[in-house]
Image (cartoon, rainbow, N blue to C red):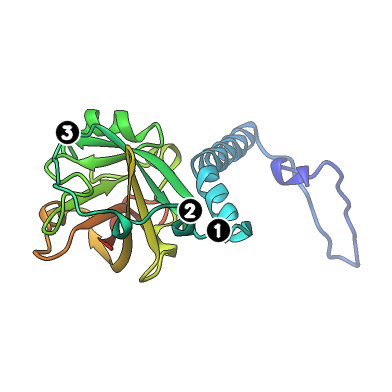
Amino acid sequence: MLDFFRPVPKKRKVKIKGSNGIVFRNLSKKSKLSFYIVNFVFLISLWYFLYLYIPLIKSMATFYLSSDTTNYAENISLMEDKKEEILVVKEIFEYEINIPKIQAKAKVKTKVSPYNIDEYMAVLKNNTVAQAKGSDTPGSGAGSMSYLFAHSTEANINMVRKNAVFYLLEKLEIDDEVFVNIEDDTYRYVIYDKKIVEAKELQYLNYREENEEIIIMQTCWPLGTSWKRYLVFAKRV
């Protein structure tokens, strides 16, 4: 196996048959140096690839190997069972999102600018989801929209490693559930649409549906790159 990293095999055999044969010659110092440099670059590239994508590989393995089929909805009191209350709008700085099917559970930081790279990178690098500044807090009622992202238009390739929360959004299907926990309240959403859009299509940051309260979840696409964006739309039940 190590012969792959040698410019000339350690052991050499020459078989002569008649006037034909195989002749080995030693490489020049320059050729050997070039050979070792190429191998060094190959090993560094392989290491960096693994370094970046190990969180993604772990997420995929957990998704496919997990046998946990617990229905999260059975463990909470749905909002429909509560008495009608007057909606009190208050400032929320942090809450939690839970997507049982892909075992994604993370804190969400509110009021994060998707245009300020320093601001959102400080949030995303900690495996925290960001809610775009200007979008609404979950639970705000019909006509509101919460835009949640774990990857942004300016994020570089290193974000592949640093934020794995939404890696498996593509595994979600229509009617799968998403739960948002804000203090003592739990809001339940069901997925109704998915889109793949260009990285510069920013109109969804202001998207609304008049008669529905929705959340939009964004990650990178194709998986592990920053070429396009994968959007998942869910409406509150």
C-alpha distance separating marks 3 and 2:
27 Å
Q: Amino acid at mark 1?
A: Thr
Numbered label attached to residue 75: 2
Tell me if residue 155 can be seen.
no
Q: Nearer the viewer, residue 42 or 138?
A: 138
Q: Report the label total.
A: 3
The residue positioned 50% from the left and 48% from the top of the image is 56
Query: Where, quadrant-wise, is the C terminus in this rendering?
Result: bottom left
The residue positioned 23% from the left and 62% from the top of the image is 197
The residue indicated by pointer 3 is 91
The residue indicated by pointer 1 is 70
Q: Is residue 7 left or right of residue 169?
A: right
Using the image, determine if residue 28 lies above or below residue 60: above
Q: Is residue 205 left or right of residue 98?
A: left
Provide residue 3's location: percent of width, then percent of height.
77, 45
C-alpha distance separating marks 2 and 1:
9 Å
Using the image, determine if residue 147 lies above or below residue 107: below
Provide residue 78's location: percent of width, then percent of height.
35, 56
